[in-house]
Amino acid sequence: MALLNATLPWNVSLDINNGYIESNFSGDTQPTVKNWAALFILVIIFFTVAGNILVIMAVSIESKLHNATNYFLCSLAVADMLVGFLVMPASLITILYDHTWPLSEQLCPMWLFLDVLFSTASIMHLCAISLDRYIGIRNPIKYSRSNSLCKALIKIISVWTISIVLSLPIPIMGFQDKQKVFVNGTCALNEPRFVLVGSSVAFFCPLVIMVVCYCLTLRDLQKHSSSFPQESKNSKHSSGEISSTSLLKSGSSSKKSTFPINKRLFGGPRDQGKRGMMQAIKNEQRASKVLGIVFFLFLVMWCPFFITNVLIAICQDCNAHLYTLINIFVWVGYVSSGVNPLIYTLFNETYRQAFARYLQCKYHEEKKPKTITTR
């Protein structure tokens, strides 16, 4: 076929034989597009890592936060910090490369493994906190005697072990068959049966347990509160001072912080014992509200991702539209890893004061000198 050169008003040369189109615009230089989304994601990554490091430091240093629930929250902060340190940067790179995987193919299964591991660990930690608090409130005396740092660590290790076992099949499948972890050049799990089973076991079932335990805990707290109607009114003035120093105390951190069945635990007059029990209930109610916010935000931020993930596994013909949604929902879930430190800062004075000191490189609270009064 003969070469056809047609000079058009905007100087476009057509070569039909080679299928080549050459454009010679008067101003070929295109303005550089600023990627504001990438900059926003970098900010999210920074605050996720920094905020959770502050939580870990606070639980490790502050003696007021040394209880079972805060140890769980510290372990949860480790998972959230690793999300910001290991998972989010790789996800950002895929966004810059139009959601294709630019790194080594061997790294894709490992990245998916870490992604699923940390999200599973987060829901398992929240589920364990719900169970732990409900058991502590249901049987406070027995629980307070059996609770210890060693047993809290065993529970945390169990949570991580379960999370690793549930996530381990991903790299095994990925290394055996690359098609299980690649979809059109995108690093994504491509095994519908595993997605359905994994989402049910690692997210939806623990979520149901967490919600049920939290509702039962609130019900028991309401029952205890209704048992002391007069003391409830009298303790409103003093509840703020005590609860502000004990954020998220589990129902078992001390015998006085639980709901004693036997009034002799207080070892004082009857009225004083009632006030102490009512104060403990108030502290637990405040802690439950903070944990309720953590649970609710985790639910709102991760449910869209897992629901869409299940729909992709079920509906093979509508993947094109759902993949666009899941790329958005996954980052909504990632943001939840950086939200928890903000919640602790807003709702608890102990964390707030500790964070303020750490940012000033003051890692221990300054002891006020004792004043000696003379008559």
Image: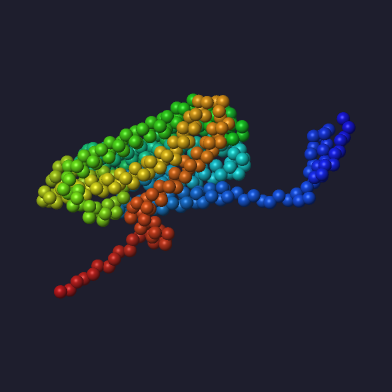
Question: Foreground: 208 or 140?
Answer: 208
Which residue appears farthest toward the right when viewing the image? 2
| Residue 275 seen in render | yes
With 108 as the anchor, is 158 left or right in this view? left
Q: Position of residue 28 (x, y in %)?
A: 75, 49
- Residue 346 in the image: state x and y as whole percent: 37, 52
The residue lying at 41 percent from left, 30 percent from top is 201
Left or right side of 16 for 69: left
Tell me if 108 is positioned left or right of 72 in this view: right
Residue 360 left/right relative to 93 = left
What colouring does the structure picture have?
rainbow
Tell me how many marks there are.
0
The image quadrant where one finds the C terminus is bottom left
Whole-percent x and y of residue 203? 42, 33
Q: Image point 47% across, 45% down: which residue?
A: 335
Quadrant in which the N terminus appears: top right
Residue 143 visible somewhere in the drawing: no
Q: Foreground residue, 297 or 334?
A: 297
Residue 73, percent from left and from top: 37, 45
State the residue lying farthest toward the left: 269
In this picture, is 29 found above or below 361? above
Image quadrant assignment for residue 321: top right
Q: Which residue: 67% across, 51% down?
A: 32
